[in-house]
Image (spheres, rainbow, N blue to C red):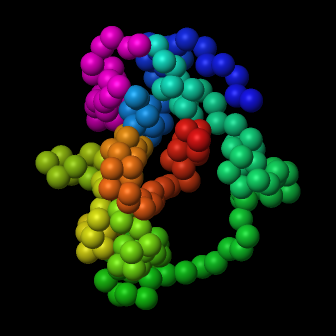
């Protein structure tokens, strides 16, 4: 049974994580805030969560899901995959098989940073109706140097948001609440395309 959540608020997150430089700018706290009080601000060119609509009700959810304070990786793997990993022997993580792949479509392959395999898989899933939308990392149209999350519903849009983003961590998870709302209101089968470092954050919300 999960331990009872201790009373805490965004100020706790700010003190324990953000002020100490431990924030990864994943946006998870923004995406899971039940009242939509948090937002992504920009400080010296870097994304940073902020309390946009005070006061904070001290529900403690943002603090609980934040990976900046702790990522219990082995425990998360056991919860998600049902398998306990020996970190000394299996350093890569939990997996069945490993492959080297690339997209068959030349345009998709050339648009990607390392073969466009993920973009090709998402395009296939959208075209075949396996998913109705994908939550991916893109760039702000008005400020193209700022990475941000995008909800994509057409496969043709995917190549615009292909390649890894090195302009700072894209706060993709800030769109979680919007994506979840889409799932429940429209019964969509969303898929989240994630970098390994952001996927860990997402798993803390389970």
The answer to if 56 sits in the magenta stretch is yes
Question: Left or right: where does residue 151 sit relative to residue 81?
Answer: left
Q: Nearer the viewer, residue 191 or 199?
A: 191
In the image, the segment drawn in magenta is: 35-57
Please provide percent x and percent y for residue 202: 53, 44
Q: Quadrant location of residue 55? A: top left
Question: Left or right: where does residue 139 sit relative to residue 20?
Answer: left
Please provide percent x and percent y for residue 154: 27, 70
> Which residue: 17% across, 52% down?
141
The quadrant of the rendering that contains the C terminus is top right
Please provide percent x and percent y for residue 146: 27, 45
> Which residue: 39% across, 80% down?
128
Residue 35 seen from this side:
yes
Residue 44 seen from this side:
no
Q: Quadrant location of residue 98? A: bottom right
Question: Left or right: where does residue 43 sit relative to residue 104?
Answer: left
- Tell me: residue 51, above or below residue 185: above
The answer to if 21 sits in the magenta stretch is no
> Which residue: 70% across, 37% down?
72
């Amino acid at each position: 049974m999960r331990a009872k959540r201790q009373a805490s608020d965004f100020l706790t997150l700010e003190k324990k994580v953000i002020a100490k430089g431990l924030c990864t700018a994943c946006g998870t706290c923004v995406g899971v805030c039940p009242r939509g009080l948090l937002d992504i601000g920009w400080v010296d060119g870097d994304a940073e969560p902020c309390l946009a609509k005070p006061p904070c009700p001290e529900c403690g959810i943002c603090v609980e899901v934040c990976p900046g304070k702790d990522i219990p990786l082995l425990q998360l793997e056991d919860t998600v995959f049902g398998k306990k990993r020996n970190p000394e022997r299996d350093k890569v993580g939990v997996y069945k098989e490993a492959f080297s792949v690339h997209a068959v479509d030349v345009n998709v392959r050339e648009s990607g940073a390392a073969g466009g395999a993920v973009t090709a898989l998402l395009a296939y899933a959208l075209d075949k109706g396996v998913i109705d939308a994908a939550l991916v990392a893109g760039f702000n149209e008005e400020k193209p140097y700022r990475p941000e999350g995008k909800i994509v519903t057409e496969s043709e849009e995917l190549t615009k948001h292909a390649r890894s983003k090195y302009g700072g961590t894209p706060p993709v998870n800030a769109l979680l609440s919007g994506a979840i709302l889409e799932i429940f209101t429209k019964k969509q089968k969303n898929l989240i395309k994630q970098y390994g470092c952001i996927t860990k954050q997402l798993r803390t919300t389970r």
